[in-house]
């Protein structure tokens, strides 16, 4: 079968939008497609060295995010934990990469955590407006994970919030 | 609009949580009898002062936690995982 | 601008702004408020009072304004009850006055004034409860009373919210706030300083003080610039703190574009900030209080501080001859400023018999007469004040004083609102005649005038002039007459006394009975005076009388700002299946199912909804249809104790379920009533996939997590939602197997019996096939990774060309399941148990499970309980309606007469393509056992219809289930 269909097909148009007279777009927004996402949920010790609360750690070629007590999301990597369910979520979550000078400004319109204290490598399962999201601090921005069913609404929420800072959707 | 100190995530806005139940009750055994089940299902105290409640961090780590909250001042006195050892 | 002083003021005389008020054109300057501009144009009359329609003028210069409420128009807006005193003037502003008819100067409703004796305190209470009173008065009262009219048009403006975190939040950028912010910012912590005005400075903008050799406004601006230069400081102007909540959460509203003639693109009009601060400094200042005297509401009577603001900040010549009336030192500067601006001061009337300190001498120096030990006993005028009468406090002849301006000061009350909202206590200060902030409950402190401390040097640390004045002064017994306590609500001293006489002694009752302090200004200039009068009437102290709760908002906030950006399509977030866009492109009309939107039916040319769903359902029965059922909750359950979890949450037994098979399961709630149902498949030794109904997916997941955390922590298993990972397509109809045979690989469909599960591939994509039937036909559910759903869906449609495969929506699905007697949330409504739904047989397993103990209660096993039945119309054609009540023949003959005992109700109905007539499911007392074949009457009391119906089995179609097993 052909490639998987993006949940954002009808809303992602490359280009620059919103207010652009303040030194360029404040937000660069794009979907990270084709990632392999695996949820690991353990009922006992996994035998692996996985990151603790609110943290991420490199694992193999990818990264492991702690997303709750005894629960991790593996991104583009795999593991064989003991005493744990390993569940494919590659299609269940949409990953958006937010970079640019206004990432915090945009997210703070709906995210109640203290984003000034959210650093590279940090992980936070939190709200963005009405959406339950997972934030992962990356160099120069944030990867935002949201349930596929809400992805289009979340994209529209972000682009609406980003209008006053200007935003760019790069050509994939 | 208070902050709940999630044992896993740290202090988070109340809007990320859902209230679950009175945490001072324990589920009776299946054969505990009608009275015990009636009390468990329907009877709730409405204490003035410290109270123990189950909350779930639904928009966060999804942990069920026990929150000790003063019903007069809204002060959160403690929060701990509902499941021991997590 | 006939009343503009020749120079001075913090206005930009180079920028003239045009505006309209009640249709008339005026001019003002940049820096004006609507109030200052109107006053500068000599427009004194700005509104009519709430109840009596008395003429009213500008009384204050800030948010405390009780009178000058106007409706702002233009830019597609109609915003009622805006305070002219806080509305910044911009070029092209359009406003109109309120509560007058036909015009402000000729208000026929002013006849209310003559009827005043008929509108005493508690008028509403008295007429609402008892007699024909309210019905008689209501139309008239509704027309006459009230404020501005809101708009019913959509709000064209946009709003948003923002969260912020800081170590120190300083509320108010007057002298105290500026000093506090600078001190906090020096430590490098994150500091937010918010100021409701467009300029920082607070009282420094008008009280002509000198700090460190600079005039007040310049000193304040220098502090602001120092703050703005620091990275760790956020300074927000035009931003009011309106609510103080738990854990130091302070709500602000920032007015971002209200002061602009044209708002920049992509900028919201107003923004609500939710600030979580480690520490809050309340530098909210103080609000001047009036002194009460008869007819004290005439236009031209205003607070002395406000008079100074209009003189000094906005260069408005307020009149030609003034009387200043005070009980304290602060108003002396007002008299001096008036005189300096060329306004004759007829006298300064001071309640105190022998005022001392430097101020009386300064007054004498300026040649202004002092009437010490006097009070005002009368006030003459109509649309403007003409004069007052002053008499010795101890009695004696009244002396008339001609004037067109009366500046009043009853002292200054700390603005303790946010302190009180935060849970801080208040203490009544007898000397100040006001409350000071007391012990706090949260991490905040009050500084400066907000504490009742008015020494500028001490507040700022700057070297200041000798202009300090004490606001301390005695109270006043108002002379008899029409003495207005609360201008905003037209509450008089007589009303307060009447409330006491009638037993409304508590301060909360006083508020509700008289409406004291219930206006848009929330009694900022009236509560204290009203409480003092109440204290006198009760012969108790003010402290004993107390104060009503301080509630947010401190000042009115537009509903639009509170709603923020979550309006329109964003009001509820839309949750879309992976096939949503296909549905949209193929004529689907949608229906909401929680946040999900699901296709209701696919309308072809000219079809009605009923045409479409009957066609779709019939097609499933005859051939094959496909439906998007991705919204079903899907929960992955793994771990050695997975089976034990299932055994404890389902009423029926799962121990015998083999790998590769699925089983329908029913869950009860702890109270023994039905909670949710669905099919659970065993995918591996310790691996299950549970499905739930769409509506209960979140709740069921949450309950499983609860049980595992709280009730059964010993169970070694984990639950994970995979609802979003897997799209699901129902393939239903006698030709479904033939269709799937064309597209699936890796399986021999003849080896997939009813309730079996198989791993299959579709064009190379790994899927799961479940042979499950909701429609009662030979049917399958195909679960596949969501990103491949659309490709698979279109593949099924094209593969089935020879079979005529067609999509079907929720309505058709509903028709099919009603024909089969399958229950859904309409029947599983939180009041029905397993037996009521015809599922009692499932609950026979002898194992403990959630809800078992309570399900055995006598009330839930009573044979007379409402239970599921089917209904058909006896005429074979008449439609039912959801919610219809089932009645006896005697109760509908000759016509239904209510009230009547209902025997049950219709839960779902549909036209049945299979039976060729409408059918319904219903809950009926005694169920089928007591009523099979009986005739009942389904009554819609709203529509007035009665349908004669026969009670039948709810399994209308293929009751033995031969088709789904075929």
Image (tube, helix red, strand yellow):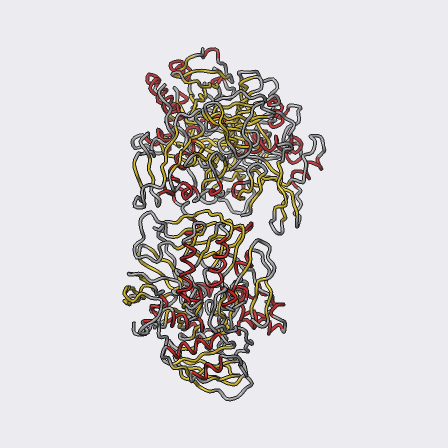
C876 vs C318: above or below: above
Give how far across and how far down residue B41 sits, in percent. Answer: 65, 38
Q: Quadrant of residue C794?
A: top left
Left or right side of C839 for C258: left
Task: Provide residue C223's location: percent of width, then percent of height.
Answer: 43, 60
The relative height of residue C595 versus residue C720 in the rendered view (above or below) is below
Relative to C902, say whether A35 is above or below. Answer: above
Left or right, C774 with reference to C11: right
Viewer-proximal residue, A146 or A63?
A63
Q: Is residue C81 visible?
A: no
Number of marks present in the image shown: 0
Image quarter hosting the N terminus of chain C: bottom left
Residue placed most toward the observer, C679 or C836: C679
Q: Position of residue C315 (x, y in %)?
A: 35, 71
Q: Residue at x 39, y 60 (%)?
A: C198
Instruction: Kindly tell me whether residue C158 is visible in this rendering.
Output: yes
Q: Determine the image quadrant of residue A105.
A: top left
Furthest residue toward bottom: C397
Residue C299, image x, y percentages: 40, 74
The reply, left or right, for residue C4 in relation to residue A117 is left
Nearer to us in this view, C262 or C533:
C262
């Amino acid at each position: 079968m052909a490639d998987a269909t993006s949940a954002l097909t009808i809303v992602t148009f490359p280009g620059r939008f919103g207010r652009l007279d303040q030194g360029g777009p404040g937000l660069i927004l794009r979907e990270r497609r084709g990632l392999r996402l695996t949820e690991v949920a353990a009922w006992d010790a996994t035998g692996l060295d996985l990151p603790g609360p609110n943290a991420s750690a490199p694992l193999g070629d990818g990264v492991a995010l702690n997303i709750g007590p005894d629960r991790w999301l593996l991104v583009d990597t795999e593991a064989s934990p003991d005493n744990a369910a390993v569940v494919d979520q590659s299609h269940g979550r949409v990953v958006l990469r937010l970079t640019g000078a206004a990432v915090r400004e945009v997210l703070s319109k709906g995210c109640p955590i203290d984003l000034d204290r959210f650093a590279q490598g940090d992980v936070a399962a939190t709200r963005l407006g009405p959406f339950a999201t997972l934030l992962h601090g990356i160099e120069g921005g944030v990867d935002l994970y949201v349930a596929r069913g809400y992805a289009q609404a979340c994209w529209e929420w972000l682009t609406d919030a980003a209008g006053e800072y200007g935003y760019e959707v790069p050509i994939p | 609009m208070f902050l709940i100190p999630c044992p896993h995530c740290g202090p988070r806005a109340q809007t990320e949580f859902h209230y679950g139940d009175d945490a001072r009750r324990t589920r009776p055994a299946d054969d505990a009898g009608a009275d015990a089940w009636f009390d468990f299902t329907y009877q709730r105290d409405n204490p003035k002062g410290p109270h123990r409640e189950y909350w779930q961090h639904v928009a966060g780590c999804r942990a069920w936690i026990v929150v000790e909250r003063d019903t007069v001042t809204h002060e959160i006195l403690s929060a701990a995982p509902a499941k021991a050892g997590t | 601008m006939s009343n503009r002083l020749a120079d001075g003021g913090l206005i930009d005389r180079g920028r003239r702004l045009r505006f309209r008020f009640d249709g008339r054109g005026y001019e003002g300057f940049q820096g004006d408020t609507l109030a200052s501009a109107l006053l500068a144009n000599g427009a004194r009359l700005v509104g009519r009072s709430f109840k009596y329609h008395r003429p009213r003028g500008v009384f204050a210069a800030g948010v405390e304004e009780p009178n000058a409420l106007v409706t702002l128009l233009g830019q597609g807006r109609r915003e009622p009850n805006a305070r002219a005193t806080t509305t910044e003037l911009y070029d092209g502003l359009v406003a109109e006055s309120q509560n007058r008819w036909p015009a402000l100067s000729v208000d026929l409703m002013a006849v209310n004034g003559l009827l005043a004796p008929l509108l005493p305190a508690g008028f509403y209470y008295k007429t609402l409860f008892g007699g024909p009173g309210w019905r008689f008065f209501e139309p008239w009262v509704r027309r006459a009373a009230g404020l501005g009219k809101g708009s019913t048009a959509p709000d064209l403006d946009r709003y948003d919210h923002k969260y912020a975190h800081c170590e120190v939040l300083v509320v108010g950028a007057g002298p105290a706030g500026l000093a506090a912010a600078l001190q906090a910012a020096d430590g490098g912590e994150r500091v937010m300083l918010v100021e409701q005005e467009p300029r920082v400075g607070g009282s420094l903008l008008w009280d002509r003080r000198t700090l460190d050799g600079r005039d007040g406004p310049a000193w304040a601006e220098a502090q602001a610039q120092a703050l703005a230069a620091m990275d760790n400081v956020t300074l927000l102007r035009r931003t009011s703190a309106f609510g103080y909540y738990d854990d130091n959460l302070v709500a602000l509203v920032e007015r971002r574009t209200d002061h602009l003639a044209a708002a920049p693109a992509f900028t919201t009009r107003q923004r609500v900030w939710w600030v979580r601060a480690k520490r809050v400094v309340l530098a909210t200042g103080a609000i001047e209080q009036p002194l009460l005297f008869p007819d004290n509401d005439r236009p031209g009577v205003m607070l002395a501080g406000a008079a100074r603001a209009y003189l000094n900040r906005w260069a408005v010549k307020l009149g030609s001859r003034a009387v200043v009336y005070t009980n304290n030192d602060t108003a002396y500067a007002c008299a001096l400023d008036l005189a300096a601006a060329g306004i004759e001061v007829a006298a300064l009337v001071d309640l105190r018999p022998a005022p001392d300190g430097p101020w009386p001498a300064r007054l004498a120096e300026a040649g202004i007469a002092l009437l010490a030990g006097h009070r005002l006993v009368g006030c003459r005028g109509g649309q403007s004040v003409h004069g007052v009468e002053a008499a010795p406090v101890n009695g004696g002849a009244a002396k008339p004083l001609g004037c067109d301006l009366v500046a009043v000061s009853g002292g200054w009350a700390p603005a303790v609102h946010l302190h009180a909202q935060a849970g801080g206590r208040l203490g009544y200060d007898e000397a100040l005649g006001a409350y000071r902030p007391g012990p706090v409950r949260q991490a905040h402190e009050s500084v400066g005038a907000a504490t009742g401390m008015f020494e500028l040097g001490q507040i700022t640390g700057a070297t200041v002039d000798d202009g300090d004045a004490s606001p301390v002064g005695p109270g006043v017994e108002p002379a008899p007459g029409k003495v207005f306590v609360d201008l905003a609500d037209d509450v008089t001293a007589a009303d307060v006394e009447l409330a006491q006489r009638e037993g409304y002694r508590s301060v909360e009752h006083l508020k509700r009975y008289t409406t004291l302090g219930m206006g848009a200004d929330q009694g900022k200039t009236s509560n204290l005076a009203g409480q003092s009068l109440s204290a006198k009437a009760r012969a108790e102290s003010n402290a004993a009388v107390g104060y009503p709760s301080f509630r947010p908002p401190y000042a009115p906030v537009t509903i639009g700002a509170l709603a923020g950006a979550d309006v329109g399509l964003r009001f509820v977030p839309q949750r879309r299946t992976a096939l949503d866009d296909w549905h949209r492109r193929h004529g689907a009309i949608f229906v909401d199912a929680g946040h999900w939107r699901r296709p209701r039916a696919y309308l072809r040319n000219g079809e009605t909804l009923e045409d479409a769903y009957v066609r779709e359902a019939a097609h499933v029965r005859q051939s094959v249809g496909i439906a998007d059922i991705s919204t079903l909750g899907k929960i992955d359950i793994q771990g050695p104790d997975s089976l034990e979890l299932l055994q404890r949450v389902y009423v029926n037994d799962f121990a015998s379920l083999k790998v590769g098979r699925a089983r329908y399961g029913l869950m009860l709630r702890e109270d023994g009533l039905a909670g949710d149902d669905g099919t659970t498949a065993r995918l591996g030794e310790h691996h299950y996939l549970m499905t739930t109904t769409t509506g209960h997916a979140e709740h069921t997941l949450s309950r499983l997590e609860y049980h595992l955390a709280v009730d059964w922590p010993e169970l070694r298993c984990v639950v994970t939602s995979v609802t979003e990972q897997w799209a699901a397509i129902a393939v239903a109809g006698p030709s479904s197997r033939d269709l799937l045979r064309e597209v699936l690989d890796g399986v021999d469909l003849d080896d997939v019996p009813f309730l079996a599960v198989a791993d299959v591939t579709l064009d190379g994509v790994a899927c799961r096939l479940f042979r499950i039937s909701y429609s009662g036909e030979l049917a399958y559910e195909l679960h596949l990774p969501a990103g491949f759903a659309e490709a698979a869906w279109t593949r099924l449609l094209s593969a089935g060309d020879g079979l005529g495969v067609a999509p079907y929506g929720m309505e058709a699905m509903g028709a099919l399941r009603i024909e089969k007697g399958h229950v859904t949330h309409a029947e599983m409504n939180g009041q029905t148990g397993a037996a009521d739904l015809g599922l009692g047989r499932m609950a026979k397993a002898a194992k403990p499970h959630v809800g078992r103990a309570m399900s055995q209660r006598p009330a839930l096993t009573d044979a007379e309980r409402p239970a599921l039945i089917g209904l058909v119309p006896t005429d074979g054609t008449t439609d039912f309606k959801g919610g219809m009540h089932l009645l006896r023949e005697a109760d509908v003959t000759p016509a239904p007469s209510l009230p009547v005992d209902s025997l049950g109700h219709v839960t779902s109905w549909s036209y049945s393509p299979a039976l060729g007539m409408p059918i319904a499911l219903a809950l009926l007392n005694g169920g089928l056992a007591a009523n099979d074949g009986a005739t009942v009457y389904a009554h819609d009391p709203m529509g007035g219809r009665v349908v004669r119906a026969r009670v039948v089995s709810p399994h209308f179609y293929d009751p033995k289930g031969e088709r789904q097993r075929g």
